[in-house]
Image (cartoon, coloured by chain):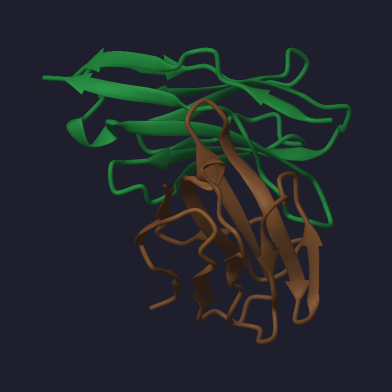
Amino acid sequence: EAQVTQNPRYLITVTGKKLTVTCSQNMNHEYMSWYRQDPGLGLRQIYYSMNVEVTDKGDVPEGYKVSRKEKRNFPLILESPSPNQTSLYFCASSLSADRVEQYFGPGTRLTVT
Amino acid sequence: AQTVTQSQPEMSVQEAETVTLSCTYDTSESDYYLFWYKQPPSRQMILVIRQEAYKQQNATENRFSVNFQKAAKSFSLKISDSQRGDAAMYFCAYRVYGGATNKLIFGTGTLLAVQP
């Protein structure tokens, strides 16, 4: 089954404790991205990747890092999480950057205390 | 910069009735895509309908249809014969045509309740 998976689905952590949210797709997609969803703000793009080893900032990249060492994986790294990063995070992928069809992961609910 | 505005934070509809969710956007581009996404309590993002700006005909998917007014930069979603399963958060989204980043710009969402 073609899908985008995220792990963990739920995470509660403390300020400053480094964490990684994984994202993996099994569709051989070149393009992957991360969004965060906050009440009253909708979804906003954090980072995106056009292909392996090619990443760039989205609209709200502060406090986040990403890497794209393999085509299927695009982890989101919070090296020193803060409470304002409490949010719902979505990974999305598409065959390439110019393909309109995007597939979303199931979301990761992160709480930073 | 492109923006998407959903002015109705919450809406309610009776089962079997029709409801319209509003969305306006701002862009200087002439070619772009518009989308409605549904987010049920499971939080999954589900594409409901898509409209290409160069198409004059309004998109339709079963009980879901849009009213696309390009000059007014308006893109409303009509849900006919509402069902309990339609209860969800609905997001309007914009994507520039041929964009290099495939970035979606989302509105703030409309929470739809379906009353029995």
Percent x, y of residue A84? 55, 41
Q: Quadrant of residue B83?
A: top left
Percent x, y of residue B39? 39, 41
The residue sitting at 84% across, 30% down in the picture is B1
- Chain appearing in brown on the rendered image: A
- Report the front residue among A96 and A108: A108
- Counting labels gives 0
- Image colour for chain B is green
Left or right of residue B38, residue A78 in this image: right
Q: Is residue B92 above or below residue A89?
A: above
- Report the front residue among B66 and A106: A106
Residue at the far bottom: name it. A70
Left or right of residue A90, residue B42 in this image: left
Q: Quadrant of residue B32?
A: top right
Percent x, y of residue A82? 55, 48
Quadrant in which the N terminus of chain A appears: bottom left
Residue B79 appears in view: no
Residue at the far left: name it. B116
Q: Is residue B63 above or below residue B11?
A: below
Left or right of residue B4, residue A109 in this image: left
Left or right of residue B6, residue B28 in this image: right
Percent x, y of residue B56? 70, 29
- Report the front residue among A4 and A6: A6
- Report the front residue among A87 and B88: A87
Q: Is residue A113 above or below residue B8?
A: below
The residue sitting at 46% across, 62% down in the picture is A105
Residue A34 appears in view: yes
